[in-house]
Image (tube, grey):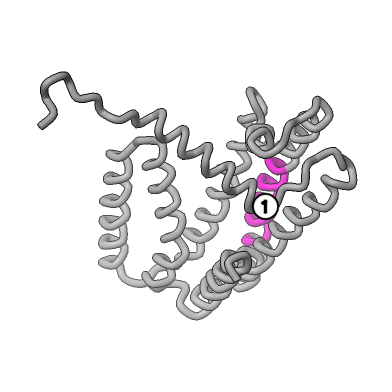
Amino acid sequence: MMFALPFLLVALYSLGAQWLMLHLPHSLLTVCFVLGPVVLGAALALRAAGHRAAVALLAVGAVAWLVWLGTQGPHDMAWLYVTEYVGIYGFMAIWFWHSLRSTPLITRVARTVHALTPAMECYTVKLTRAWALYFAGMALLSVALFVWLPFGGWALYANIGSPLALGAFFVGEHVLRYRWHPEFDRASIWASARAWRARAQETEAALNPPEIQPPGSAR
């Protein structure tokens, strides 16, 4: 049950976003539902990096923007949803591609789970590049479909087709990895997620060391 819960939540969110975009595209409820997880994710990432002032500014800015949006009356929000989608996928593409300049992102994650050989490290570099190209391709495809299709067609792609494509890419790579490189230890998706979370917590602890009380100040 715990294994299926994240997939169930993603499915419910995707179906909810699709329904709201089709039936209430100009509603503040739709804006909050679609953009809320993005703002929350950004806030958590900033907090983990130790930028608490930025978290407060983000929260204040989001509330102020919603208040302003509510005073403007109904507007076509299609551009907002497309911008959000392209922004997320574009950011992911840049993040993965930029990591190739030093230690690739997939390599860093894999090192926390596997003892990597040179051939395995080479594969993680190629995989990081593949993910970067995947995210960039999905962002460009989103723009093209928005131009060519009615908004309902684009929403179907973004809310239903995109998560399915992401899952297919992820599962397909997981299967092909052990066919091309059977030397990889059998590590589950959850083991990788736990290792990544542990690494993030170590980074947060390094960025936010505990305050050292001067001698004689403790009460």
The answer to if 59 sits in the magenta stretch is no
Tell me the chief SS of the magenta region.
Answer: helix
Q: Position of residue 211 (x, y in %)?
A: 25, 28
Identity, as a three-letter code, of the amino acid under mark 1: Ile
Residue at screen point 75% across, 59% down: 168
Residue at screen point 72% across, 42% down: 133
Residue at screen point 41% across, 28% down: 206
- What range of the chain is rendered magenta? 131-146
Helix, strand or loop under label 1 = helix
Figure quadrant of the C terminus: top left
Nearer the observer, 133 or 121:
121
218 to 134, vertically: above or below: above
Q: Position of residue 28 (x, y in %)?
A: 37, 70
In the picture, residue 62 is in which quadrant? bottom left
Q: What residue would you read off at disc 1?
A: 189
Residue at screen point 46% across, 32% down: 203
The answer to if 136 sits in the magenta stretch is yes
39 to 106, vertically: above or below: below
Q: Is residue 151 visible?
A: no
Instruction: Give the residue furthest to the top.
Output: 215
Q: Position of residue 64 (x, y in %)?
A: 26, 56
Q: Is residue 5 left or right of residue 65?
A: right
